[in-house]
Image (spheres, rainbow, N blue to C red):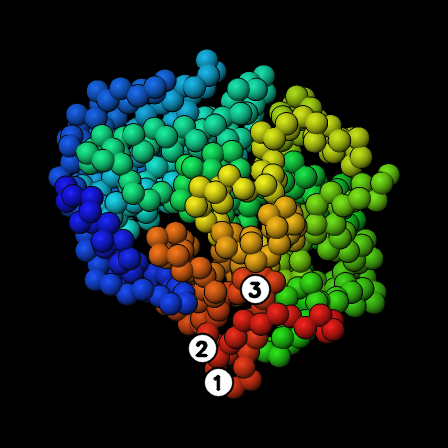
Amino acid sequence: MKAADSWRQDLGCLRDCRRAGIRHVVVLTALMIVPCVKVAAAGAASCESLATLSLPHTTITLAQSVPAGEFTPPLAPDAPAGSKPTPLKDLPAFCRVAATSSPSPDSTIKIEVWMPAADWNGRFEGVGNGGWAGNISYGALGAALRDHFATASTDTGHEGGTALFALGHPEKMIDFGYRAVHEMTVQGKAIVAAYYGSGPQWSYWNGCSTGGRQGLMEAQRFPRDYNGIAAGAPAAYRSHLLFASMWIARATLVDPAAYIPPSKYPVIHSAVLKACDALDGITDGIIDDPTRCRFDPAVLTCSGADAADCLTPPQVEAVRQIYSSSINPRTGQEIFPALEPGSELGWSGHAGGPEPRNISVSYFRYVLFHNPQWDIRTLDFDRDVALADQDDRGVNNAINPDLGPFQFAGGKLLLYHGWADNLIAPLGTINYYQDVVRTMGGAEQTGSFARLFMIPGMGHCGGGPGCDTFDKVGVLEQWVEHGTAPEKIVAAHRTNGVPDMTRPLCPYPEVAKWNGSGSSKDAANFSCVLRDPSKP
């Protein structure tokens, strides 16, 4: 391998050196452009020799060289019968290491570490999970590997996508909450160091949803694990988020008269766009700032019998509940914010039925009440929220706003959330960020190491009519390695893989405002400005 001083000189290489075809689009202020120099991995150890590597409470179960081309990952443990795994294509040759870590007597944390056989960029990327995890994130590993990262993923200590694993296993709950990702990071870096002869110079986290929560937990509990953390749509206040899911389920699934068929979601969405799309001066199918939207679902009330293009009175009330924060009925305090206008096309995640979302139900059955027969009709939004707060003990809820140790370690945090998120209310992330601002000494002090970018029209972690494609880790590289904080990020929308619109993403509380001339599909015609508080 090249000496460390040699490749450190080239850490400013742009990610477009390895992201041909405009896979991601990013613009930063004072962007540094230098030649891209790749690092050869003539490692200190062969891949197969890592099978005998000795690590604390960790056993290597596989160490194999994988040739370049297509790789078919193992089938997910809870995959439906007859399903087949999706092959990962266009991978470089890599060393694949699997390991099992047991930091407690009841821990079985599976880890995979993938390392480029050549052209390693000297960096480590930990990748996150979704839902209750329960499997290795192979697709994310492949994406990081193509970008020449050494990369790692974990199943968080269990198999399967529900919380059944937690019933009677408190140590496994700790593994899921925070310990598995930390173990993956520590052991993963050790494996990287053994293979290449030295560890990574820079380490980055890249995750969304549960992966976003995992990133925040790393910043809060293990501030030196990662130099930069990209945390998207974080399920940070996990217990309260799951109560919000039950709030929607109670409104739409308990009473059959209140059920809203998914076929009516486009009708509601169209009415919302009619009321609020043009508030930003552009009619483009994107609600720029849903908090300004004033939409009354009563305008869709059926004039007679139920029909496909209208809502019955119970359905109107159900829509109002979806747009309303979950509230403690005794104190009137908010439990968790509501979904925003513009999210309607994805409501089936919480309201599609016929039963409440399994990710949510399994929390109440197997984690909170330890009762597989628990029924949603018994849920108390006062007593049971208090029980959940007491039960969590900081294991799952990553809501500590004191990021002082992470800041002191030089860490940088990139938060992002889609305004049209249909699963996790975006105001939850804004609330957390504002807590951080208050705790860390104000907006300017916080902005030196942590910034939030709200994305109009983007759904849960991606999708929707908004510009959802940008290079999260690339933004962090410039910030961490060169001190270039993101004043704006240019993101792209793609149709069939081809970029057809770009927009700037602005650091909260700024918003992107069209300059009034030029194409509204070109980011160059927008500026980041503070929203005028005098306007509705």
Instruction: Say which amino acid is labelled 2.
Output: Ala
Kindly check if marks 1 and 2 are in contact, taking CB atoms under 8 A apart as contact.
Answer: yes
Mark 1 crowdedness (10 Å alpha carbons): few <14, some 14-19, many ≥20: few
With 93 as the anchor, is 356 left or right in this view?
Answer: right
With 409 as the anchor, is 37 left or right in this view?
Answer: left
Residue 502 spot, x, y in % from top left = 45, 71
Q: Nearer the viewer, residue 14 or 135?
A: 14
Residue 155 spot, x, y in % from top left = 43, 31
Q: Is residue 523 visible?
A: yes
Residue drawn 58% across the image and 68% down it: 511
| Marks 2 and 3, how far apart at CA | 17 Å
* Mark closest to the chain's N terminus, 3 or 1: 3
Query: Would you name the residue on which mark 2 appears?
Result: 524
Residue 394 spot, x, y in % from top left = 61, 30
Q: What kind of element bears circle 2?
A: helix
Query: Would you name the residue on which mark 1 appears?
Result: 518
Instruction: Say which amino acid is labelled 3.
Output: Pro
